[in-house]
Image (tube, rainbow, N blue to C red):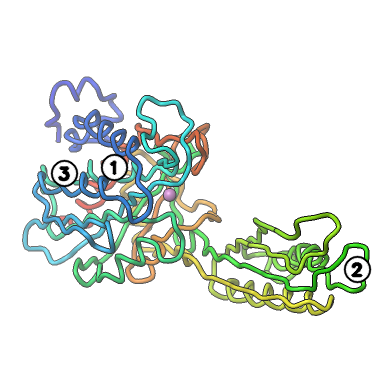
Amino acid sequence: MSEHAPEIESYLGTTLKRRYCGLADTLESRAELEAIRRNIHQNPELAFDEVRTSGLVASLLDAWGFAVTRGVGGTGVVGTLKCGEGRRSIGIRADMDALPIHERTGLPYASANAGRMHACGHDGHTAILLGAARQLARTRNFDGTVHLIFQPAEEIGAGGGAERMLADGLFERFPCDAIFGLHNHPGVEQGNFLFRSGPFMAACDTVTITIRGKGGHAARPHQSVDPILVAGSLVMALQSVVSRFVDPNEAAVVSIGTLHAGHAPNVIPDSARMEISVRSFSPDVRASLENRIRQLAISQAEGYGAVAEVDYVRGYPVLVNSERETEFARQVAQELVGADKVVSQAARITGSEDFAYYLQQRPGCFVRLGNGANQPLLHNAGYDFNDENLTVGAAYWTRLVERYLGR
Ligand code: NI
């Protein structure tokens, strides 16, 4: 297979030429993809407000011959392309939303919307999937149905875009035998793939604990019930949850992110409040973390004559990649970029992803794609998606679809 245009032949090195064989069109449109990515970057939109972004996605898919369904789960878009008589189907998902961060990259295509920024690379994920869409529409080298799922609101936690699209009948209206997704990963060499079958990303829960004591004069503490003392004691006690109650072979995180109480040095306040982030990788550990945190809060407060109210909110579940689909996706990546750029069983990630909800209903694989070893981290005001990944990502999705729906 050597049907590349001459300029592509000269552009590609020998190794790359072999690896990207058959994907010349994707490479040809690299500049175009970069323009699309930077356009989305410059116009970031927050969760469920991705009107411009989803409009751009829908119009491009439409122009390339996809059947386009808008307004799935709010601002979500699904592009469907069917080839041949094959009954198999595949879903690929990209997220589209930005974050409430003020961009400080100084880039010429930096955010034009103050206080909003594509600091998680969802602009890149969207552009990558558009690149694959274009390639698949041109070559139509598969037998079956592909659904390209452009999801809103990945960043907001409970009630996010994946839940909304599923509640809107995503898999009933657009049946998928399996589903695949990717996220860029700063701190790892650009273009390297991180796979892991089984639990890969954490469940993420948020706990708010309100300790109610009895306010009074700081000079007469014996006439008060001091919630600050309870809070201090509870902060220390919570450190025992992971270290003493979770199997050392498991992984979990309990981080106290906020602690607020009082307004004046000579006043004992009525109450104190703390917010906690809890991460886990199995339903059992998740349940025991919740129990321990509740018990500790209530008993610690009681020990000091106060009362604790615990509001435990479950966020995204554990993201579990199915074994067969992960092995399949690994093979696709290895053929594309070589085994040296593919980590077969990467370490677990304590971040979370609402792609986990799709994987509760369908087998599939979520992969992390290196954004560059020395790049700013996700959700940082200096972050930018690495455009070198546009071609790699689009080629990966294209090949994955062609293999999954092989003729
Ligand atoms: Ni993200």
- Give the camera-side residue of 63 and 49: 49
Q: Residue at x 39, y 62 (%)?
A: 160
Amino acid type, callout 3 = Leu
Residue, disc 3? 60
Task: Report the quarter where the N terminus lies.
Answer: top left
Residue at the left extreme? 84
Q: Answer with mark 2 or mark 3, whichever residue precedes in sequence.
A: 3
Instruction: Tell me the element at label 1.
Output: helix
The image shows residue 362, relative to residue 372, as above or below, that is: below
- Give the camera-side residue of 340 and 367: 367
Q: Is residue 403 left or right of residue 356?
A: left
Q: Residue at x 23, y 46 (%)?
A: 398
Quarter-of-image position of residue 115: top left
- Give the camera-side residue of 114 and 142: 114
Q: Which is closer to the viewer, label 3 or label 1?
A: 3
Q: Circle 2: is it few (<14), some (14-19), or many (20+) Cα within 10 Å?
A: some
Q: Compute the Cα span from label 2 to label 1.
A: 62 Å
Task: Report the quarter where the C terminus lies.
Answer: bottom left
Residue, disc 1? 128
Q: Residue at x 79, y 79 (%)?
A: 302
Q: Is residue 55 left or right of residue 141?
A: right
Q: Position of residue 210 (x, y in %)?
A: 68, 70
Residue, disc 2? 221
Amino acid type, callout 1 = Ile
Q: Compute the Cα span from label 3 to label 1.
A: 13 Å
Quarter-of-image position of residue 258: bottom right
Amino acid type, callout 2 = Pro
